[in-house]
Image (spheres, coloured by chain):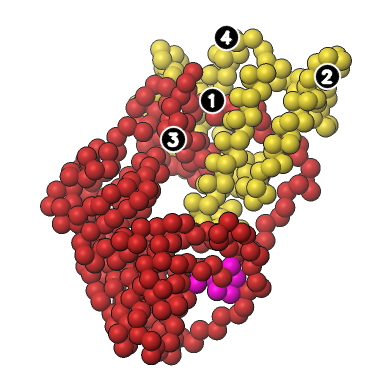
Chain colours: A yellow, B red
């Protein structure tokens, strides 16, 4: 029964979802990707969904993020991302070798030093939002802050993460 | 790979919005992506950055993350010196016979506060006068000019959200839109958050803040803009277009709207309320935006 409801909403929004996929650069694959989207959604949905339309668009966004990621990985040489991430505590890291060890350690120190400079409130909001999955409205009311304050704090963190990632890409 | 700064800012806005589980405006987002094929590239570059870098945020020791206090005392930053806030004092405002005043769009109303003191309300404004002598103004929304020159009268206290202002014999203007408050002083002085930050605003200074803000910071302002709505003119120096849109709506009663990206852009200049009322399109060359009719209202848009 739930699938029938979701399928109806999927069919109603077929054109908009296609447009959305194309807007993300799906190109000629848009129709195929829409089929993939429905397969994923229909096999993964278990219970009722609060906002089915948003759910479909969210799934479409994640699909396009996956598509673009795998395209990018095919095109460019692998940067040392995995090696860097593996140096985090509790990561099941492989032995990266002495030279890479030093360079990776320096990069990690720099990233951590920059992250420490973030305003504590912005960092806390980011963690609650992106790691704990609270909505911006929930955080705003829990912390007694306005929606615009939450937004501007999140911008600060996203902006820094983008700058750090670009810096690392250049190295 | 050079993406314009504006595109980067717009992409950041969209990332903030779309990452919220409550986000619903998918059609608006589609329209932005379609407006320029490179917009999707800018958006996905940010998505990738967050995805790559957030493991480092997760890995940060928990001790580095300070649990925010529910209500922090505010800091005043005046003349480049940050002064620690004094402990908040309890405010006991007797609310006797509170009277409510409101104005419709485009309406201007003058309220006497006793003696020569007067309060001028711009359109779309709602407030309540409370206290023993009704010298406490609760500004719910909109914009007011306070012209307080009567030496025989007590101080006026104005509350806008969680911001408290006390006059020191003065002319000043306060606007409240949503949870944002703007204060501009043209004569005398106003003390903001007297129980906490105690930031003194002098003529030619302004304060832009939002409910819950931890820091109050004074900035230079254009004195001639104070109360200009009463004269049918709106003057700005480097003002976010979002504020200009709110003012225009109040003064003309016309429903103007602008996207987040346009709202963040800044405007300097003077607008005539009568002219905008006569032809909303006249804003286009002044603000450097496109002005298009959207239902009952007008939408400011254009290249981001």
* Residue that carries the numbered disc 3 in the rendered image: B10
- Viewer-proximal residue, A113 or B224? B224
Q: What number is the disc on residue B45?
A: 1
Q: Residues within 10 Å of mark 1 (few under 14, many from 20)?
A: some
Identify the residue at horizontal 57%, vertical 41% (top origin).
A156
| In the image, residue A91 above or below residue B205 | above
Disc 1 with disc 4 on a shared chain:
no
The Cα atoms of the two marked residues, 4 and 2, are separated by 26 Å
Q: Which mark is residue A75?
A: 4
> Which chain is home to disc 2?
A
Q: Are marks 2 and 3 in contact (CB under 8 Å)?
A: no
State the mark number for residue A101: 2
Residue depicted at x 56% and y 22%:
A66
Q: Is residue A74 above or below residue A152?
A: above
The alpha-carbon separation of the residues under discs 2 and 3 comes to 38 Å
Q: Secondary structure at mark 3?
A: helix
Q: CA distance from mark 1 to mark 4?
A: 15 Å
Pinpoint the chain carrying mark 1.
B
Q: What is the distance, in whole Å, between disc 1 and disc 3 at their CAs?
A: 13 Å
Q: Earlier in the sequence, mark 1 or mark 3?
A: 3
């Amino acid at each position: 029964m739930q699938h029938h409801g979701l399928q109806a909403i999927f069919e109603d929004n077929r054109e908009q979802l296609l447009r959305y996929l194309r807007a993300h650069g799906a190109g000629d694959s848009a129709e195929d990707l829409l089929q993939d989207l429905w397969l994923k959604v229909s096999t993964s949905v278990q219970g009722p969904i609060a906002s089915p339309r948003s759910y479909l668009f969210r799934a479409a966004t994640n699909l396009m993020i996956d598509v673009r990621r795998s395209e990018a990985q095919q095109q460019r040489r692998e940067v040392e991302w995995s090696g860097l991430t593996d140096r985090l505590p509790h990561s099941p890291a492989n032995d990266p070798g002495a030279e890479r060890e030093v360079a990776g350690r320096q990069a990690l120190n720099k990233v951590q030093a920059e992250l420490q400079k973030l305003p504590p409130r912005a960092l806390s909001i980011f963690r609650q939002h992106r790691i704990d999955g609270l909505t911006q409205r929930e955080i705003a009311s829990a912390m007694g802050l306005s929606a615009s304050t939450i937004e501007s704090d999140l911008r600060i963190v996203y902006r820094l993460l983008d700058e750090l990632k670009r810096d690392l890409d250049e190295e | 790979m050079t993406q314009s700064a504006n595109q980067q800012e717009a992409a950041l806005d969209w990332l903030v919005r779309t990452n919220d589980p409550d986000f619903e405006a998918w059609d608006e987002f589609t329209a932005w992506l379609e407006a320029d094929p490179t917009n999707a590239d800018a958006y996905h570059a940010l998505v990738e950055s967050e995805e790559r870098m957030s493991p480092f945020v997760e890995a940060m020791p928990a001790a580095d993350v300070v649990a925010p206090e529910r209500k922090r005392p505010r800091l005043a930053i005046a003349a480049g010196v940050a002064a620690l806030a004094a402990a908040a004092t309890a405010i006991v405002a007797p609310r006797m016979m509170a009277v409510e005043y409101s104005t419709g769009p485009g309406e201007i109303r003058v309220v006497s506060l006793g003696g020569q003191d007067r309060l001028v309300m711009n359109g779309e404004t709602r407030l309540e006068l409370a206290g023993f002598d009704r010298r406490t103004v609760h500004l719910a929304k909109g914009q007011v000019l306070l012209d307080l020159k009567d030496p025989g009268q007590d101080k006026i206290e104005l509350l806008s959200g969680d911001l408290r202002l006390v006059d020191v014999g003065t002319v000043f203007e306060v606007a409240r839109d949503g949870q944002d408050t703007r204060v501009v002083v043209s004569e005398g002085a106003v003390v903001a958050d007297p129980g906490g930050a105690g930031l003194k605003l002098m003529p030619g200074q302004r304060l832009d803040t939002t409910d819950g803000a931890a820091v109050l910071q004074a900035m230079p302002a254009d004195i001639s803009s104070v109360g200009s709505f009463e004269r049918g003119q709106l003057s700005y120096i480097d003002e976010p277009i979002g504020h200009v849109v709110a003012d225009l709506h109040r003064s003309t009663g016309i429903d103007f709207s602008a996207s987040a990206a346009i709202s963040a852009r800044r405007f300097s200049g003077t607008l005539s309320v009568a002219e905008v009322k006569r032809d909303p399109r006249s804003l286009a060359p002044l603000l450097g935006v496109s002005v298009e009719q959207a239902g009952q209202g007008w939408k400011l848009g254009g290249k981001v």
